[in-house]
Image (cartoon, rainbow, N blue to C red):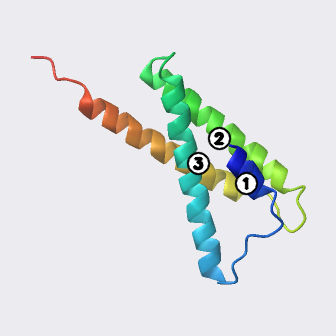
Amino acid sequence: MGVIFVLSGQQSLDSGLGWLDTVLRKLVHFGEYAVLCALWWRALRTKLTGDRALLIAIAVTSAYAASDELHQSFVDGRHGTPVDWLIDTAGALTAAVLIHRYARARKPVPA
């Protein structure tokens, strides 16, 4: 979360690659919030059931994404958007679905 905060405070991350720059930045947004959700789940599952830990991880990640967009709205040359929040939250949800499927596949089948 600290790394995300520092990168969000940078005035511009534009590489000058035009539309490709935009697509790549959105993919990075998606990926970093997927990783953040997985890390929250990993920390929370030691104290909570798997599904509850996953739901809280999604909620925390999405809330942090919203606060990150708000933070960006105060940085010169940056702006926070609901679309970026949706991309970030989609990354968290994708990680959650993958974690849920993986956890379900690992459960032993009753004989």
Q: Residue furthest bottom?
A: 17
Marks 2 and 1, the one that precedes in the sequence: 2
Checking the image for residue 33, the label placed there is 3
Q: Secondary structure at mark 1?
A: helix
The relative height of residue 105 versus residue 92 in the rendered view (above or below) is above
Q: Amino acid at mark 2?
A: Ser
- CA–CA distance in space, label 2 to label 1: 11 Å
Q: Residue at x 45, y 18 (%)?
A: 49
Residue 64 is left or right of residue 51, and the answer is: right
Q: Give the image location of residue 6, x and y in percent.
A: 76, 53
Is there a contact, CB below 8 Å, between mark 2 and mark 1? no
For marks 2 and 1, give the one nearer the viewer: 2
Q: Secondary structure at mark 2?
A: helix
Residue 102 is left or right of residue 76, and the answer is: left
Circle 1 Cα neighbour tier, 10 Å, few/some/many (<14 / 14–19 / ≥20): few
Is there a contact, CB below 8 Å, between mark 3 and mark 1? no
Checking the image for residue 62, the label placed there is 2
Residue 20 is left or right of residue 102, and the answer is: right
Residue 2 is left or right of residue 90, and the answer is: right
Q: Is residue 62 visible?
A: yes
Q: Residue at x 53, y 55 (%)?
A: 31
- CA–CA distance in space, label 2 to label 3: 8 Å
Checking the image for residue 82, the label placed there is 1
The relative height of residue 80 versus residue 102 in the rendered view (above or below) is below
Marks 2 and 3, the one that precedes in the sequence: 3
